[in-house]
Image: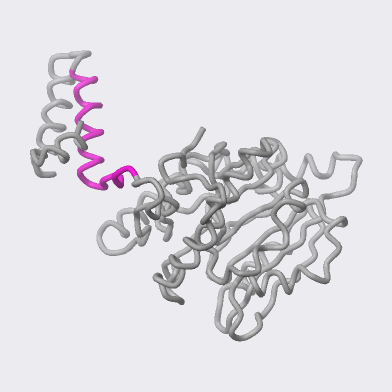
Amino acid sequence: SRRHDVYRAAAPALKRELRILAGCVVHAARFRCANGIVLAAHSWGRTREAWDPVPAPAAPGVDDFLSGRSGTVGGLRGRGRQVRDGLADLWTRPARTRARRDAVTTAHASASRPPRVLVLGVERPGSLMPQALEELRRSESAELTIAAGPGRPGAGKFENLNEQLAPQDLDGFDWLLILDDDVRLPPAFLDVLLDQATRHELKLAQPAHRLHSHAAWPVTRRDGAGTRRTTFVEIGPVTLFHRDTFAALLPFPAQLRMGWGLDAHWAALAREHGWALGVVDAVPIGHTVAPAGAGYSREQALAEARAFLAGRPYVTRDEVRAL
């Protein structure tokens, strides 16, 4: 409704939407009016859209692999997200505690060997990679092989990842974890991530972003304390690959340096192969050091993505959703 008003250039200001919402809530409570609840829900949707508008549908073929949002958090809205993150942490603590306990219990009770995980990532001086790797080493349910480390100067992210990947025998691994060097991982991160991905039979997965985290795709922000099936997962900052995807997705395309558009192509390949994708809300990460793309030219990344996706299938932003 709000979007239609915007299309007609007749949308009221946010202040008016808030006043109508308050009136609906008061009316429903004062008169015990069931219809007032419906009207309040309608008004709440309009208010959310006024506060944070959803991008217009993408024009086919015109950068429709982008989210349409910057995803950058900061200012008053960013501080509000930090407060909401703190409240969400308290609200979901029992569920997260159960998830951690179940993950470790299941791993110890299993007669089979623990899953073997290969960790790749490009580390820059002064980054958060040491802290992230230390958290991964605390895992109680997986055998780790860490190939992450400093990259070759002048090479792009995926060039460096391919060089870390080349000497590895992928037949010896159950999972591949790609990790950027500017994220903060929560406690018991890997145990819960692997447990949830296994339980929900995900072939590509990512941890959710905290609300106060640079994340361009709304579907990747935390929404509860469990796991959601989705039509899309990001190329970073953290991505988990099941061994069933290795033959189709690895090595990474050699012509990519920044990787924009690659996740949209992955999503299309997942659809073709029948792979389940998902976002794990139980272990939300913080990506706040710098927005995505802060270290390179946006125009170069866009040009690279357009060239890569030309002639390749990909999922458009209008198809990105939680299932």
> Which residue: 61% across, 41% down?
277
Expressed as whole percent of the image width and height from the top left, the position of residue 275 reads 67, 39
Residue plotted at (72% across, 62% down) = 251
- On the rendered image, what quadrant is the N terminus found in? top left
Q: Position of residue 264 (x, y in %)?
A: 53, 50
Q: Relative to 306, is 24 above or below?
A: above
Pick the front one: 154 or 38: 154
Q: Is residue 43 magenta?
A: yes
> Going by the picture, which residue comes out furthest to the front?
311
In the picture, measured across the screen, residue 48 lies left or right of residue 253, that is left
Of residues 10 and 31, the one nearer the viewer is 10
Q: Main secondary structure of the magenta part?
A: helix
Q: Residue at x 75, y 53 (%)?
A: 246
x and y percent of residue 74 in the render? 31, 63
Residue 209 rendering spot, x and y as whole percentages: 48, 53
Q: Which residues are magenta?
A: 36-57
Q: Which of the two residues, 229 or 115, is positioned nearer the viewer here? A: 229
Residue 228 position (above or below residue 194):
above
Q: Is residue 143 above or below residue 149?
A: above
What color scheme is it?
Answer: one colour
- 234 vs 269, left or right, is left
Report whether 171 appears left or right of 55: right
Q: Does 58 sit above or below residue 304? A: above
Q: Residue at x 32, y 42 (%)?
A: 57
In the image, residue 2 lies in the stretch drawn in magenta: no
* Number of numbered discs visible in the structure rendering: 0
